[in-house]
């Protein structure tokens, strides 16, 4: 844990309302994105299964967020994934990407509709084109929380995601989730990767829209 100020209540003054201008390394990810050649490697009863998927990610700026003196700028996201051979949703995920300009802290919150949440953390420079975030089971700061069944049958011990901003303005990710599958002697590395291409620009955050209309 880093050094924090004694005053835990006073919020920063004169906060810039323009989230898109203050996202640091996350700025390149703002918008709506699609990828057609995602690869998922997941555990099945008969062994690892490799699936190709198509993905749509929407990342929209939110208003600045303060924890007392701590200030975040961020993106709210929704991921929807399908496979070519199935109509049913293959994966759905929501959460936030957050950037703390004062420290370079980058966070991703993860929530999936199978009863699992996580907070992954890393650090990056404002102009970084590559950064990595990690979460570990058992940690109370940047950890993983699952249902009783998932803990029993598919225990998640760690999660990491590496993001790369590409020269052509697309971005790629590689995520690794280490699972302890019940009845298996060795952990299983559940891996996903894809490259996303922008299909629409982001919508400015609500506060900035209001301030802009008022001409402040």
Image: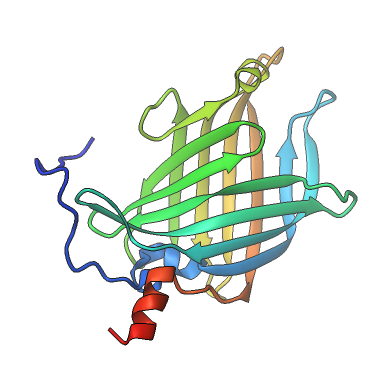
Residue at the limit of the structure toward the right, as seen here: 85
Residue at the limit of the structure toward the front, as seen here: 214
Across and down, in percent, residue 66 comes to: 28, 53
Across and down, in percent, residue 63 comes to: 38, 63
Residue 54 visible in this rendered orientation of the protein = yes
Is residue 152 placed above or below 130 in the rendered structure?
A: above
Quadrant position of the C terminus in the picture? bottom left
Across and down, in percent, residue 116 comes to: 58, 32
* Front residue (pair 194, 95): 95
Residue at the limit of the structure toward the left, as seen here: 6
Q: What residue is shown at x 65% (from left), y 36% (from top)? A: 190
* Front residue (pair 200, 63): 63
Q: Quadrant of residue 78?
A: bottom right
Residue 128 visible in this rendered orientation of the protein = no
Q: Is residue 93 left or right of residue 18?
A: right
Q: Quadrant of residue 47?
A: top right
Quadrant position of the N terminus in the picture? top left
Q: Which color scheme does this rendered protein use? A: rainbow
Q: What residue is shown at x 64% (from left), y 19% (from top)? A: 186
Q: Is residue 6 left or right of residue 113?
A: left
Residue at the limit of the structure toward the bottom, as seen here: 215
Across and down, in percent, residue 86 comes to: 88, 49
Q: Quadrant of residue 54?
A: bottom right
Q: How many marks?
A: 0
């Amino acid at each position: 844990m880093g050094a924090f100020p004694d005053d835990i209540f006073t919020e920063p003054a004169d906060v810039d309302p323009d989230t898109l201008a203050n996202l640091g390394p996350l700025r390149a990810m703002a918008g709506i994105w699609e990828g057609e050649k995602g690869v998922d490697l997941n555990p099945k009863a008969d062994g690892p299964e490799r699936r190709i998927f198509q993905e749509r990610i929407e990342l929209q700026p939110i208003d600045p967020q303060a924890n007392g003196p701590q200030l975040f700028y961020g993106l709210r996201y929704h991921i929807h994934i399908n496979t070519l051979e199935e109509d049913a949703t293959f994966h759905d995920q929501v959460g936030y990407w957050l950037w703390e300009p004062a420290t370079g802290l980058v966070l991703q919150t993860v929530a999936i509709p199978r009863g699992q949440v996580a907070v992954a953390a890393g650090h990056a420079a404002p102009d970084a084109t590559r950064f990595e975030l990690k979460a570990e089971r058992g940690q109370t700061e940047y950890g993983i929380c699952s249902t009783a069944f998932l803990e029993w049958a598919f225990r998640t011990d760690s999660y990491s995601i590496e993001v790369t901003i590409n020269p052509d303005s697309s971005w790629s990710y590689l995520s690794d989730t280490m699972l302890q599958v019940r009845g298996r002697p060795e952990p299983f590395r559940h891996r996903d990767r894809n490259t996303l291409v922008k299909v629409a620009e982001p919508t400015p955050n609500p506060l900035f829209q209001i301030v802009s209309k008022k001409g402040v």
